[in-house]
Amino acid sequence: MVAVPAGVAFVGCHNEVDSECEDDEKPGARIEIGAFEIDRTEVTVADYAKCVEAGACSRDGLSLPTTGTAEQPELAWTCNWGVKGREQHPINCVSFTMAESFCRWAGKRLPSAVEWERAARGTDGRRYPWGNDDVAASPQANLSDVTLLRNEPGGWGLEQFDDGFVSTAPVGLFPAGKSPVGADDMAGNVWELVANSESHRDEMRGGAWSYYPHALRTSDKAYAPTGRRNGDTGFRCAR
């Protein structure tokens, strides 16, 4: 884990450096946030397997995505559980409840949205974890790129980016994208679940391998129905 000291930090839309803010990011503000720790990387398949072996986590559905109400067998290829060679990729296709169970077993908890954002952008309200510069041609993050475009039928992606992965990447593989507190992959790879702000929806932060740079901005938010399990979604823990 990495330590995040207490202090005042900017959260939400920082319109001096970001012209792409959506309504749910506004208004930005400087607020006092207490000290906490957060995992340096997203929870991996290998990490989650230890919890399953201990009998504290469920493996049910880990290989079959769902919208929350309907299964999506056509997207089963995106799930990392049980796939040889993906042990150090983030665990995905997990629900909010499964993420909570893992963090509890590990003696931790899911970070709040404010804590997640503080860890991702430091105190200065930067647009991305690495600063205000756009994603580079040799990216600081795993995002929707030419590899996805060329290798998945009906795929999508931006031809100017090539992170070398169709879907997720092993955690910690993009050091240029490290956050100010030293956390990896807080932009891209998988959306990260945060402690619920609304009972009927799960909030996620950070963007994913299947999203464009807009979603990788530190203040961007996404929501999904409770119970959804998807190949673009994982988590990290805090305490």
Image: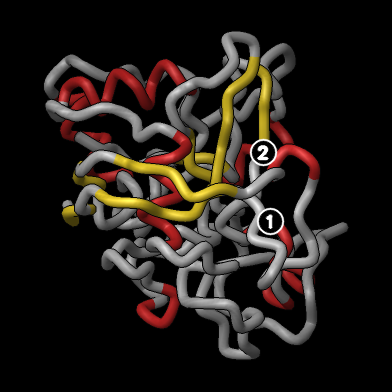
Q: Which residue is mark 1?
A: 215
* Residue 156 in the image, given as x and y percentages of width and height: 82, 63
Determine whether, in the image, residue 135 is placed left or right of residue 63.
Answer: right
The amino acid sitting under disc 1 is: Ala
> 10 Å neighbourhood of mark 2: few (<14), some, or many (≥20)?
some
Q: Which residue is mark 2?
A: 222
Question: Residue 211's quadrant in the figure?
Answer: bottom right
Q: Compared with residue 26, is residue 120 higher up or lower down, i.e. above or below?
A: below
* Residue 97 in the image, given as x and y percentages of width and height: 42, 16
User: In whole angstroms, how far apart are the C-alphas of marks 2 and 1?
Assistant: 8 Å
Give the mark nearest the N terminus, 2 or 1.
Answer: 1
- Look at the numbered discs 2 and 1 and tell me whether their residues touch, using CB distance below 8 Å: yes
> 10 Å neighbourhood of mark 1: few (<14), some, or many (≥20)?
many
Q: Compared with residue 9, is residue 125 higher up or lower down, i.e. above or below?
A: below
* Residue 168 in the image, given as x and y percentages of width and height: 51, 58
Q: Nearer the viewer, residue 33 or 127?
A: 33
Instruction: Assign a secondary structure to mark 2.
Output: strand
Q: Name the residue at 53% across, 68% down.
A: 126
Q: Please tell me the numbered disc located at residue 149.
A: none
Q: Compared with residue 233, is residue 70 higher up or lower down, i.e. above or below?
A: above
The amino acid sitting under disc 2 is: Ala
Instruction: Assign a secondary structure to mark 1.
Output: helix
Q: Name the residue at 56% across, 48% down.
A: 29
Q: Name the residue at 40% across, 61% down.
A: 123
* Residue 98 in the image, given as x and y percentages of width and height: 38, 21
